[in-house]
Image (cartoon, rainbow, N blue to C red):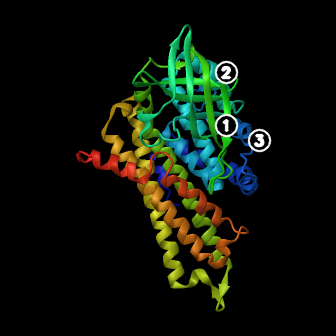
């Protein structure tokens, strides 16, 4: 069988890994999806289950409990988990990429030893705290401040839209020191840290999203990531990895939508034949498959490129527009596929009995989170030399 992943699988690891993740995700994660969405609560038992499989520390070195693999492997895992559940896939990405991967890339040796083994096992849950009520795309306008004091920093501010924020043990926090950003690793047991309101969403309802607060929260200097004022560079250097892994989440949901459409149109009969055997329906399915195949090929190619470039990828500015473009088209494609799939369900697509409505609500997040579609277009345009 033709398999685009095999083109990049030089070590023979990735295809078996993808198959193992698919088996796990469909058997363990998929049955959790409906109930977690209904309860608007992430299934906490999923963390150690994913940790046992090694999925939570894909890019962390084996000495810290990780797999020591690259970003194509992380994309493959994120895609298959998201195919089983958009919500669980989103929380997985926030933990494994936005938190664990950044510690693996930028943390000190002491920080890696202190946090990564418990994050990769699923004992600890990780999160990223960057966005604020009035600071989303314009990240440098954030108001959270870290004031130097003896032995560390006193941090005050409120973060919003924090995936995993309600139960995160370790949070990669960005705050202003002077006019520049600095990154910190904060923990839920720090005095002055508190969890605020839970945010109830239209989609990704099984992925917990919270407001979190720092009220004169003391963070010791050993929890600072990198030098003071280097947070902007740390944040920007991780964006391309983030964009590709988020693209994998969108791709997984697109594949889930096609899976549901195929199942429904093969089972549903009208005028004495399966509705998938009508040309109009068959052509819709064909377009969906072709678009998914195209986006998967682009995602795998550029994730593989990041792996080949290694640390050099963080300095390659040409990748900013490329990775933003992959995320842009993957998210738009996924929403289009999910919308077509819902229409193919007819009236049943509007009921809770069928999964497709939940998929469509979930997938819309990928046009917004991680930088809106217009922010991604901005990055692509700047890559072309447009001064906007």
Q: Earlier in the sequence, mark 2 or mark 1?
A: 2
CA distance for labels 3 and 1: 23 Å
CA distance for labels 3 and 2: 25 Å
- Residue 196's label in the rendered image is 1
Disc nearest the viewer among 2 and 1:
1
- Residue 45's label in the rendered image is 3
Q: Residue at x 50, y 17 (%)?
A: 147
The quadrant where residue 355 appears: bottom right
Left or right of 141 in this view: 86: right
Decide if residue 168 is in sight here: no
Mark 2 — residue? Answer: 190
**Crowd tier of the residue under label 3, counting other residues whose Cα lies within 10 Å: few below 14, some 14–19, many 20 or above:** few
| Residue 34 x %, y % | 73, 57
Q: Which of marks 3 and 1 is nearer the N terminus?
A: 3
Decide if residue 132 is in sight here: yes
Name above or below for residue 342 compared with residue 325.
below
């Amino acid at each position: 069988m033709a398999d685009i992943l095999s083109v990049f699988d030089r070590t023979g690891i990735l295809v078996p890994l993808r198959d193992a993740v698919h088996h796990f995700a469909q058997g363990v994660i998929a049955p959790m999806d409906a109930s977690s969405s209904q309860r608007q609560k992430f299934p906490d038992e999923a963390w150690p289950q994913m940790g046992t499989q090694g999925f939570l520390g894909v890019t962390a070195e084996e000495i810290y409990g990780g797999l020591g693999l690259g970003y194509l492997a992380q994309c493959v895992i994120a895609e298959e988990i998201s195919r089983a559940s958009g919500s669980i896939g989103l929380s997985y990405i926030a933990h494994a990429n936005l938190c664990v991967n950044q510690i693996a890339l930028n943390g000190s040796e002491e920080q890696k030893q202190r946090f990564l083994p418990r994050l990769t096992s699923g004992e600890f849950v990780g999160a990223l705290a960057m966005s604020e009520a009035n600071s989303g795309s314009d990240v440098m306008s954030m108001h959270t401040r870290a004031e130097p004091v003896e032995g560390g920093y006193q941090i005050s501010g409120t973060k919003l839209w924090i995936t995993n924020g309600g139960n995160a043990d370790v949070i990669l926090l960005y705050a202003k020191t002077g006019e520049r950003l600095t990154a910190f690793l904060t923990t839920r047991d720090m005095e002055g840290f508190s969890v605020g309101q839970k945010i109830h969403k239209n989609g990704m309802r099984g992925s917990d999203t919270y407001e979190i607060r720092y009220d004169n929260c003391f963070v010791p200097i050993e929890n600072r990531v990198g030098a003071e004022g280097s947070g902007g560079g740390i944040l920007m250097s991780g964006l391309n990895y983030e964009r590709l892994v988020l693209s994998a989440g969108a791709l997984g949901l697109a594949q889930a939508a096609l899976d549901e459409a195929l199942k429904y149109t093969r089972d549903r009969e009208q005028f004495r034949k399966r509705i998938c055997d009508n040309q109009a329906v068959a052509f819709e399915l064909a377009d969906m498959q072709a678009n998914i195949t195209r986006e998967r090929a682009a995602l795998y190619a550029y994730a593989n490129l990041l792996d080949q470039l290694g640390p050099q990828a963080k300095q390659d500015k040409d990748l900013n527009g490329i990775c933003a473009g992959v995320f842009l088209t993957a998210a738009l494609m996924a929403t289009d596929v999910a919308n077509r799939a819902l229409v193919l369900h007819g009236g049943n697509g509007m009921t809770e009995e069928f999964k497709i409505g939940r998929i469509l609500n979930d997938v819309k997040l990928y046009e917004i989170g991680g930088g809106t579609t217009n922010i991604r277009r901005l990055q692509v345009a700047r890559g072309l030399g447009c001064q906007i």
